[in-house]
Amino acid sequence: MGLIVPLSTLIQTKEQYNTHMKATLEFDLENPDDQERFNQCVKAKDLANCLSTIYINMVSIEEGEHKTNLKPSELIDTIMKEFDIDFNQL
């Protein structure tokens, strides 16, 4: 069984109306598609924080505030590891 309410609807509604929301999500973890969706939901906040950190670091480097010897792809990989993000599992 998939999501009872599409996650995108929950996110849009919460941002638009800034209200407290509660939802029950049901997954059949024996189903590979549901397992993938479950993993995406569980890691959504980590992924958002990871993307924010990548953006902040890239801007900081571009504006000369910080220097690094890492290539952009290496910096991204490093940050993703800090947040335990593996795209092969999402």
Image (cartoon, rainbow, N blue to C red):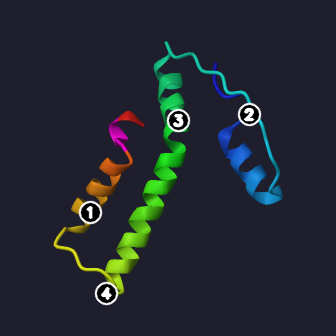
- Please give the range of residues in magenta: 84-88
User: Where does the N terminus fall, quadrant-wise?
Assistant: top right
- Point out the tag, 3 or 4, that comes first from the N-terminus: 3
Q: Position of residue 49 (x, y in %)?
A: 49, 55
- Which residue is disc 3 drawn over? 42
Amino acid type of the residue tagged 4 in the rendering:
Gly
Which SS type dominates the magenta stretch? loop
Identified at 49% across, 40% down, the residue is 43
Q: CA distance from mark 1 to mark 4?
A: 16 Å
Q: Is residue 35 left or right of residue 20?
A: left
Q: Which secondary structure, mark 1?
A: helix
- Which residue is disc 2 drawn over? 5
Tag 3 near tag 2, CB within 8 Å: no
Q: Residues within 10 Å of mark 2 (few under 14, many from 20)?
A: few
Q: Give the farthest residue toward the bottom.
A: 64
Identified at 27% across, 54% down, the residue is 77
Identified at 47% across, 63% down, the residue is 52
The residue closer to the viewer here, 73 or 60, is 60
